[in-house]
Image: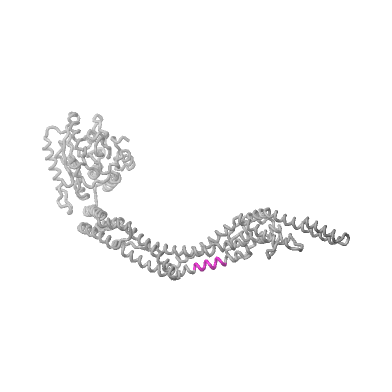
Amino acid sequence: MKMEQGMQLIDGNGKFNVDGLKDFMTATEFAQSGLSYAIVAIIGSQSSGKSTLMNQTFHTNFEEMDAYNGRGQTTKGIWIAKCSDIDPFTIAMDFEGTDSNQRGEDDTAFEKQSTLFALAIADVVLINMWYKDIGLEHAASRPLLKTVFQVMKRLFKPRKKTLLFVLRDHSKTPLEYLKTALLEDIEKIWTAVAEPETLGSAPLSEFFNVEITALPYYEFQKEKFKEQVAQLRQRFVHSIYPGRLVGDRQEVEPASVFPLRAEEIWKIIKENKDLDLPAVKVMVATVRCEEIAGEKLKCFTTDEDWLEMKEAVQAGPVSGFGGAVSSILETYLSEYDWEVVYFDQEVRNAKRRLLLSNALIVVRDAYDTMLMHLHSNTVNRFKTSLKQSLNEGKEYVAAIHLCSQSCMREFDQGCEDAAIQQSEWNASKFREKLFCDMLSEMMAKYKKQITLALAKRVESLLEAGERDTWASIRNLFKCNTEAAVSEFSDAAVSFNLHSSEIDTKLQHLREHARNLLEMKAREAADAGRVLKRMKDRFSKDFNHDKNSISWYNWTEEINLDEIERNALSESLRILSIMAAIRFDEMPDQIENVLYSSLMDGTVLDPLASDTWEEVSPKATTLLKPEDCKSLWMNFIEEIKPMVTRARSRQDGRRKTREGLAAAVAGIGAVGSAAVLTVIGSLMRRR
């Protein structure tokens, strides 16, 4: 995009080019100018040389009329371009000419809309006109200026806009005479426009700086024309400096908001095609009340007392915070009420509500910070006082009741002191959070109590692997969980919670206990740990009797097959116990299925499945059937050497006993000495 050539901001149909302006802002980096910029617009009759004047003055490249092709409309709509090599950043706006026969009946409406847009958006408006038309009603745009002045008085408070009348094709008539005549016309138009009561008889000079200059005929005096245009260009260099062309302009907005501001202004103008604006009284009230409200908001946000209070509350609670801030707010609200007393009541009340809303937005962070300090201090005080009460020997439930009630009273008093009178805020959110934090302290205490009561004992029961393991675990689980739940319920009464909230907390405690049990069960169900316990159990029962005496010390013959089967049964029970968590008393067939399949081999591969049949819906599987089968196969392989050694030892003892029997039978034949020799030999073999 060539920025000097510019882009069409508004087309001939009045459509605002949002995307084009966005690209323009990016390409020119206009938004980075901050407040250092100026906007220059030109209005005037069609074919009066507006585009030529802009190009010569600002080194832009707006399309110009080709006189050889006849006089007609060249610029359609409104165009915008960056002025070349002028400080500050200057925007040139070329407007479609008035009195266009191409538009026909639509000319007047668009003429009024575009002219009002120029006056609303630009710092300097060049009014391009032929010098010989001064004094002519239509050529000098007197009706248009009258309408514009009227609207400017009612829509805007006094602000400096520069109107620079450029008299074209000036020849012999003295410029001073032309200036006098034109100024008289302008003053008459201004005076004829009714004044809003709030402005009194505001002079034209409070709204506009009126400047008049003249240029010779471009076609016949090009050099002189260019010389005087160069002088005109110099007036726009440093134009925003004090004493320069627009040095006294007011309420400048940052360049970054130009797109939004321009689009919004055009939208308002476009929606009133015939300048059928709302009632003057309401419009003036709207704009002035907004401006006054803005001033009061700024005063509040820069108020020293407010800033001190805002800074102080960052460090900790401030005594009297609510009263002090409410007083400061009331000061500026009262000032607003006094200054808008003569405006439309509905409008002033609406803007007052907006002022208060914006002021409260400013206050809200400090208010929330104040309540966060109160909350934090109360939580710490609760913990400290609870610990002290317990150290003094009070029961936990009684200590909770005493400390929570005391701390909540202090918190409520602090919140009342922090309350902003002009707001409807309450501390319910922080009060609820305080409840939650206190309850969290209780929850942590009872969760720890449950953990200490269950964790080690559940581990021990699972390690023991007795037939009543899960019954014992259920009893342990129920007794300790319900004890904690009961105590928590008694303590929670202090917080006046709804029954549903208490039920939720109790459910969390039960879930903690259940999750703890499941975690310990899953740890114990680790395949390696289960296999080790099965081997240990087998070794114990295979090598010792119920009195823990090794059968190797027995003198009589033992049934090793029976001992092995009993030991396998005990090991299988461990596998059965660890197959699933039995959360209720409903019996299952897991042990029978395992026994029939792994010990007897009478069931047709029931362990190929990945689920257990006929188990409680509340049961949680730890080892699937196929996992149990795999573990059992590993277990059998692991114990084979132990069984083999036992059988070899039993065979050796049997042979020894048979040899002894033979020796005793031969005593009568060989004598006692020989028998003793044989016995000794047999014993040595053993």
The answer to whether residue 244 is left or right of residue 61 is left
Residues 552 and 109: in front is 552
The answer to whether residue 458 is left or right of residue 438 is right
Q: Is residue 662 visible?
A: no
Q: Main secondary structure of the magenta part?
A: helix
Q: Position of residue 470 (x, y in %)?
A: 60, 64
Vertical placement of residue 14 versus 289, above or below: above
Q: Quadrant of the image for the N terminus?
A: top left
**What span is in magenta?**
475-485
Q: Position of residue 656 (x, y in %)?
A: 79, 58
Residues 456 and 28: in front is 456
Residues 121 and 552: in front is 552
Which corner quadrant of the image does residue 105 belong to?
top left
Residues 77 and 71: in front is 77
Look at the image and say whether residue 479 sits in the magenta stretch: yes
The answer to whether residue 107 is left or right of residue 467 is left
Look at the image and say whether residue 610 sits in the magenta stretch: no
Q: Position of residue 401 (x, y in %)?
A: 42, 69
Count of marks, rendered view? 0
Q: Quadrant of the image for the C terminus?
A: bottom right
Q: How is the image coloured?
A: one colour
- As drawn, the residue found furthest toward the front would be 673
Which corner quadrant of the image does residue 47 belong to?
top left
Q: Position of residue 646 (x, y in %)?
A: 72, 57
Q: Is residue 318 visible?
A: yes
